Amino acid sequence: MTVEREREPRPSLSPQARGAAAAAAAAAVALTLLWAMGQVTLLGAGLAFLFIAAAALWGVRTGAGVPAARLAAADEAQRQDSSRRLVAGIVAALPDPAVALDRDGRVIAFNEAARAVAPALRTGEHALLALRSPPVVDAVRRSLASGEPQQAEFSERVPIDRWYEAHVIPATPTAELDRGLYLLVLHDLTPMRRIEEMRADFVANASHELRTPLAALSGFIDTLQGSARDDPDARERFLAIMREQARRMARLIDDLLSLSRIELAEHIRPDTPIELTGVLRQVVDGLQPLARERGVDVKVAAEAPLIVPGDRDELIRVFENLVENALKYGASGKRVDIAVERSSSLDGPEAKVLVRDYGPGIAAEHLPRLTERFYRVDVGQSRAEGGTGLGLALVKHILARHRGRLQIESTPGHGSTFTAHLPALARPGDEINDESIR
Ligand code: ADP
């Protein structure tokens, strides 16, 4: 394809220039004639001279005397400049990394988000110098060559794994942007990829957790049908283990179903007024046998009454998990203290339930991951305690549904404190002041 260049017009004067020149010339001729005829005084000549000078100055100010092609070129440059500024303004306002290119691939503008992805981008330079990823470079080349939209996926490994989808979109070039306009927009796929990975990990973990007791069960069934067929002692022992494995599978399935139910309903805030101290006492009473078995003294200190909008069964589940963990993993401290306190946050009155044990504590690197599904500090210990690795994940999601949160503090060697924060009613009988979540 060839592009025919318009021939440059011959230099000519603009209408203003022609007018000014004509006025100045007429005045000069008249003055000369009058002077020659002796009809003009010195004062008249001075006035006429001033008139000529003013006409000439007006001509300069209005561009008179400048070739029209140069003026047109200056106008064009100004229009180009304001179009580029407009493009830069739009690109800067886009939330995703975005770069505007001309048809040669030179950068017209880019935003801060694009600078973070490609720090070498410079206005006026070729974009391909700054875009390191081969799929993006290819997509830009293809789009510039064909004038068609192109798309490519790429990932960055440093400083952390990130995935992007690059779109190169030829924009309709306006008359002002004579070098064309192509938009390169990067769409961040990282959050979506992370969720996909988490889902895949979750399915792998859940299958693994279920397969372990299942393998134990089928192993014992084989043994009972074979070598232990006529051994009543072995049969009793194996049946007890099998019952425990079956219970473990049931607990796991129960926790998995609870988690997905709570996640599905997480946007609906429960709003039944629940008195927390009563719930805590009920939980502690239920766990007394375990506390006695472990030789742990459980104390509840409560300010009564403290009412939160909530779901009683779910709150029981939260405190059961926290107190049971304290009894299982912190038993060596021989003491568990539970406190129900009123406090306040920026959002209003708050209830705090602290569950404190004096056991071995948890190393700092584990703390941020404890609420992940299936995350355990010590898998063997968790299994031995009948844990599923889902307890704290459930706690976190239930508290989120109640618009609360879980705080974990621990000093290795001295124990741990798990604190549930829940929005509370200022006084019993108060309304929940949050229409948006109903
Ligand atoms: P699990 O079913 O394994 O108890 P959780 O989600 O309830 O699962 O807890 C995750 C892990 O957090 C536990 O396996 C344990 O390693 C650790 N943990 C929880 N509570 C305590 C505690 N009070 N003291 C020490 N470690 C704890």
Image (spheres, rainbow, N blue to C red):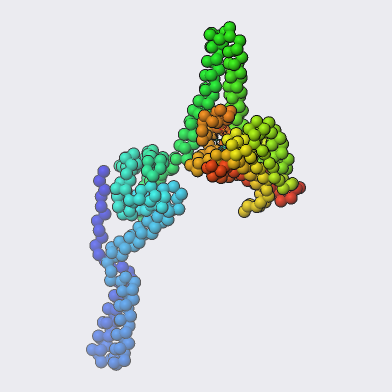
Quarter containing the N terminus:
top left
Measuring from the top left, give residue 402's x and y in whole percent: 64, 42
Quarter containing the C terminus:
top right
Q: Residue at x 73, y 40 (%)?
A: 278
Pick out the residue farthest to the right.
429
Which is nearer the eye, 20 or 67? 67
* For residue 297, above or below residue 380: below
| Viewer can see residue 213 | yes
* For residue 249, above or below residue 419: above
Q: Is residue 94 left or right of residue 9?
A: right
Measuring from the top left, give residue 378's x and y in whole percent: 51, 33
Measuring from the top left, give residue 228's x and y in whole percent: 56, 10
Q: Residue at x 70, y 45 (%)?
A: 301
Which is nearer the eye, 287 or 201? 287
| Viewer can see residue 434 | no
Pick out the residue farthest to the top.
230
Q: Residue at x 24, y 56 (%)?
A: 7
Measuring from the top left, give residue 421's x and y in whole percent: 63, 46
Q: Is residue 85 left or right of residue 239?
A: left
Q: Quadrant of residue 69?
A: bottom left
* For residue 237, above or below residue 314: above
Which is nearer the eye, 384 or 60? 384
Q: Ligand 1 sits in which quadrant?
A: top right
Count of marks placed on residues:
0
Q: Residue at x 25, y 46 (%)?
A: 2
Which is nearer the eye, 391 or 126? 391
